[in-house]
Amino acid sequence: MLRPPGVVSWLRRRVNPLFLLGAANLVLLFLLWLGLSESGVVPRLFLPSPAEVLTRFGQVRGELAENTGLTLLRVILGFGLGCGLGLAIALLSGWSRNVQRALEPVVQILKPIPPIAIAPFTLLWFGLGLSGILFLVAWGCFFIVLVDATEAIRNVPKVYGWAASTLGATRLQTYLRVVLPATLPGILGGLRVALVIAFNQALLGEFNSASGGIGEIIIKGYRFNRVDLLFLGVLIMVVLAVVADQVLTYSFRRAVRWAN
């Protein structure tokens, strides 16, 4: 008679060991936080306990929900604008060398400017409203996607195009069906980096404008010496960034199944 497999063997077949290792590391990190805060090794003024952060969450959950929605809206709009424009220019440059030669000097001049250095100009040009934060987010995402997509197109082996030409493919067919699919993993990498930049830039804009969002929550925690509120804002931002990255990766790979 066949005996049903044990729990251990069942888990080995269905659970990735690396996932378990990552989960164990998170548990250890939480226990370290709990131990340092509860033991008094680090004063509560600098490191609140998980219980204090959870209590603060219950007190301000309505305000947090509203501000989380604002930050997500700014990230999504700025990310879409910056990445869409960067990807469009990269694809156009990959198709036409003339476009590439015309745009490359401008890109090389503007690319080294740190996104944080744009913040004062953003306040001057756009004020404290939504448009300024969107500009900051889009600026940070644009160059990441533009550079990564351009390099991905350049690194496609020329033999792919030669093989397509021998089979009778036109230049446009080769670009759409051979070159672009080969660049998709590189584009995904650029999008994931740009997503992290998008959250950073949204926070920077919210710090400067004080127009709601998780950034304003963090600033309140700092100004009023409410470290539990500050920690809560940071934790929510981390969770949002991780979830957004997983959603982006899953959606991209579902759309392009061969990239798995």
Image (cartoon, rainbow, N blue to C red):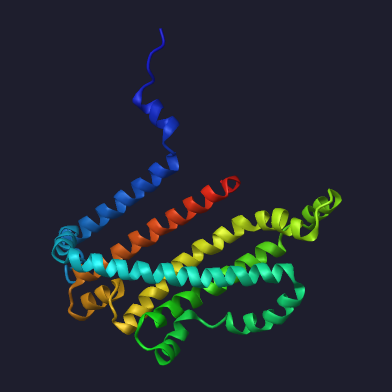
Residue for point 41% across, 44% down? 19
Return the x and y of residue 243 as percentages of the image width and height: 38, 56
- Which of 238/8 is in front? 238
- Which of 58/77 is in front? 77
Residue for point 41% across, 81% down? 131
Q: Quadrant of residue 46?
A: bottom left
Return the x and y of residue 221 as percentages of the image width and height: 21, 75
Q: In which quarter of the image is residue 18?
A: top left
Q: Is residue 142 above or below residue 129?
A: above
Residue for point 45% across, 80% down? 135
Return the x and y of residue 96 as percentages of the image width and height: 74, 71
Q: Quadrant of residue 159?
A: bottom right
The reply, left or right, for residue 61 in relation to residue 85 is: left
Return the x and y of residue 174 as percentages of the image width and height: 76, 56
Q: Quadrant of the N terminus?
A: top left
Q: Which residue lies furthest to the right in this view?
A: 166
Residue for point 52% across, 53% down? 252
The reply, left or right, for residue 87 in relation to residue 73 is: right
Q: Which residue lies furthest to the top in this view?
A: 1
